[in-house]
Amino acid sequence: MSAMGDKDLGEAALAELLTSSGVAVAPDEIAPVARALEHINAAARSLPRPSFDDTLEAYYRLLDQDGTGADA
């Protein structure tokens, strides 16, 4: 799905994907699965993305500020 970018996965494509993966899904279950995926995608997009400082850089910067570094 990430290769598709911002485009939603259509019901036909979802049915094909599930069928090719070996998952048995009834035709009337495809639409609810597609809606659930849309809701999950919308929820994921609403999450705040961490800034660069929320990564390992902040951790190492804190170590440098403490002055302990590897001597702890």
Image (cartoon, grey):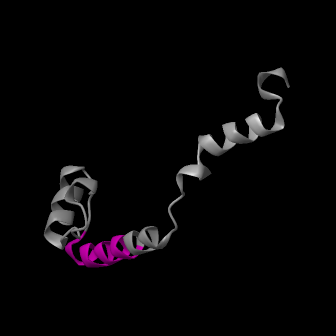
- At 22% from the left and 53% from the top, the residue drawn is 3
Which of these two is toward me, 14 or 69? 69
Give the quarter of the figure containing the N terminus.
bottom left
Can you give x and y, in whole percent of width and height, for residue 46 in the image? 46, 73
**As drawn, which residue projects farthest toward the top?**
71
Q: As drawn, is 36 to the left or to the right of 26?
A: right
Quarter of image, res 35: bottom left
- At 24% from the left and 50% from the top, the residue drawn is 22
Asked whether residue 31 is drawn in magenta, I would say: yes
Which of these two is toward me, 59 or 7? 59
Give the quarter of the figure containing the C terminus.
top right
Q: Which residues are magenta?
A: 26-39
Can you give x and y, in whole percent of width and height, for residue 2 in the image? 28, 55
- At 59% from the left and 46% from the top, the residue drawn is 55
On screen, residue 61 above or below 72: below
Q: Which SS type dominates the magenta stretch? A: helix
Q: As drawn, is 62 to the left or to the right of 5?
A: right
Quarter of image, res 50: bottom right
Can you give x and y, in whole percent of width and height, for residue 39 in the image? 39, 76
On screen, residue 24 above or below 30: above
Which of these two is toward me, 10 or 4? 4
Quarter of image, res 27: bottom left
- At 61% from the left and 52% from the top, the residue drawn is 54
On screen, residue 65 above or below 48: above
Which of these two is toward me, 69 or 47? 69
Asked whether residue 36 is drawn in magenta, I would say: yes
Can you give x and y, in whole percent of width and height, for residue 31 in the image? 26, 78
On screen, residue 71 above or below 5: above
